[in-house]
Image: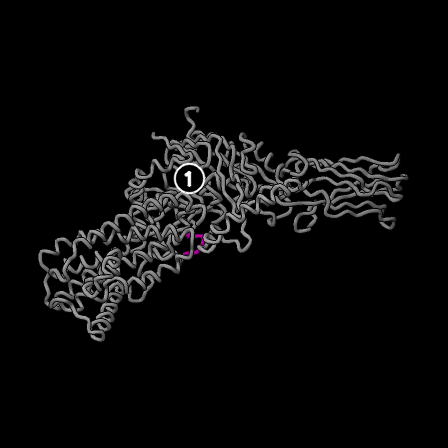
Amino acid sequence: MSDEAIIRVENLGKKYRIQHQQNGSTRYKTLRDAITETFAAPFKALHRIGRSSLEERVPGSVKPLASRSSSEDFWAVRNVSFEVKRGEVLGVIGRNGAGKSTLLKILSRITEPTEGRVRIKGRVASLLEVGTGFHPELTGRENIFLNGAILGMSRAEIRKKFDEIVAFSEVEKFLDTPVKRYSSGMYVRLAFAVAAHLEPEILIVDEVLAVGDAQFQKKCLRKMQDVSRQEGRAVLFVSHNMAAVSSMTDRVALMDRGSNVFTGATERGIKEYLKSSDQGCGAYDSPLSNSSKPFVSQIRVNSAKGEAIHISGQNMVITVVINHADPIRNACFSFQIVNQYQHPVVHCWIYDIDTPICREGQSTILTCRMPSLALNVGAYTLTTFLSEPPGGQFFEKLEGICPFQVEIIGSQTLFGWRPDACGYITAFEWTKH
Amino acid sequence: MDELILEAGRAERNYWRDLWRYRELFYFLAWRDILVRYKQTVIGIAWAVIRPLLTMLALTMVFHKFAKVSAPGATPYALLVMAAMLPWQFFSTSLSECSNSLIGNSNLISKIYFPRLIVPAGSVITSFVDFLITLALMAALMLWYGFFPDWRLLLLPAFIMLAFAASFGLGLWLAALNVEYRDFRYIVPFVVQFGVLVSPVGFPSSYVPAKWRLLYDLNPMVGVIDGFRWSLLKGEGVLDWSAILLSAITVILLLTAGVWYFRRMERTFADVI
């Protein structure tokens, strides 16, 4: 264990027992269930012995264990090891259900690990959800004290920081109003203000920034950075917002199905995450193998980050293979990049009259390089057109092919990147006169 | 800097130290519950006076006026009932509050670590505030009747302790059970209703037939109520010390087992709540 490591997680595992309930999906039992289970258990056991030998012989049964018993072990987290150093912001990323929340629950001591060990030097404060423990009937002032205590501050500490908290939250005027009358923005601001003034050695932040207005979000991000860089504390930042993760963290731990599959530089971690997430293939292969009419047989979207992910502002290369039994006279090929709202954002074309194509052989390979393609974030597809010039034959139109994602890394906007903000991002400068 | 190690079974070892460390949170949770308790009610804190007063009047009417039950000595019957109402109302409010306490704080329990014991403990404290108000009502009532307690009053704190232990002990059971089995939501009001009849709230213990006496004394509230009457009302109702002892033993068993059961279940609260 290196000296500055403030959190050390070693082979951490958490096992849950999942009850397979036939009726209802309530998590808690009723007494009736408990009673019937107790009485039925011996019979079920007998029944099970009789059946299990049969089921094991069934080929291709995916989960023989699950089908046999009414409860099943499930490892929400397993074999997770990493270290967080003093002054570091570690991003924790992964898909839903990858075990991020369980990991945080263990670190914040809400639940105990089943195996492995965590060493923590210092106080941990978690912001699993802002406003935890806020009581709607209490006033802002009262809630500051209550929430502070819940987050682990002492009364003296809260008193000392009270004015600072109030100033940060920007709700001075409503301090003596019950928080149930607050707007959701005010509520979040107050809650985050309390949390931001904690002085834990380790701060756990989980999707807190999903709420609140943009200006406040920025303030929070800055506060988090101050906390880690200047005050030498460690921050664990859990988010699905890759832009925030990339601007906030230097290292990430990538979780997948309960274990951390990668720990290291943020850039690579995000790439791995995007690769693992099933968001598109960026490729097209024609179902046709032979046709008298010309057709597009293959398209590949190649971006700097791999096939299915494009990082906005970087190069993209699209490779197209056109099959044509006979040479095409004056071939015209074009494609559109269409965003998730079905609006074409970019149109690129190549015409035989400008650049001779499809005049020789049975197939033609074309590549289209788009330098610094600054698409907005979101999901995109291609639409292609293959034809003769206007008035001539129309060979093929393909729609919704080569799905790929666009991510923005390393730059922030006040309001966050949204797919619906625009189609394309261009460089701009403002001057005030 | 002290190092915290988290691994299976580790929480057990830090438990009592943590309980002390989180005392401020305990204070704040109790403070919140007290603050919130009557906040949205029209007459607010007056409920703490009206409820025991009306119950006392009703019980006095039914038992004393209609059923012609009378106090063994010369004590006004209303005082006899009020002295019993004190611990009984504390006990019954504690039970209802405790049993819902964990569920009511599920957002905290599933998100923040702290020794869960402070949640039901906070509920008992909140009920104790009501108890203090009722105690003031009792004092006013005694003044009204011109009835002044004697040296036996000095023993009242001991009986308050016993009432505390009984409320907290059973409360812990109900709180933990209610997390796992929501049936207790229905059981608790029933127990409270039933309890008024099997505890000497509306009548003196002397009315209980001798052959039922032992079974009757097993009810921990019998000793508590008799003790309250004895110490507040100048030895009203002969105090059966063996009955008090039996009550005390039951209460201590209940409390110890309650703490044990609660701590056993506590580890999984965050997962099942």
Verify whether residue A357 appears in magenta. Answer: no
Q: Is the magenta stretch mostly helix, strand or loop?
A: helix
Query: Residue A64 occupies which quadrant of the picture?
Result: top right
Part of the protein shown in magenta: A182-187
Q: Nearer the viewer, residue A32 or A181?
A: A32
| Residue displayed at 61% across by 38% down | A274
Identify the residue position indicated by label 1 in the image: A108
Q: Nearer the viewer, residue B21 or B54?
A: B54
Query: Residue B5 occupies which quadrant of the picture?
Result: top left
Color encoding of the figure: one colour
Is the residue B114 above or below the residue B67 in the image? above
Determine crowd level at label 1: few under 14, some 14-19, many 20+ residues with C-alpha closer than 10 A: many
Tell me residue B263's x, y (percent). Answer: 35, 44
Verify whether residue A186 appears in magenta. Answer: yes
Tell me residue A41's x, y (percent). Answer: 50, 48
Q: In which quarter of the image is the N terminus of chain A?
A: top left
Name the chain letter of the residue that bears numbered label 1: A
On the question of residue A161 being in view, the answer is: yes
Q: In this view, does B74 lie to the left or right of A100?
A: left
Tell me residue B230's x, y (percent). Answer: 15, 59
Tell me residue B254's x, y (percent). Answer: 29, 49
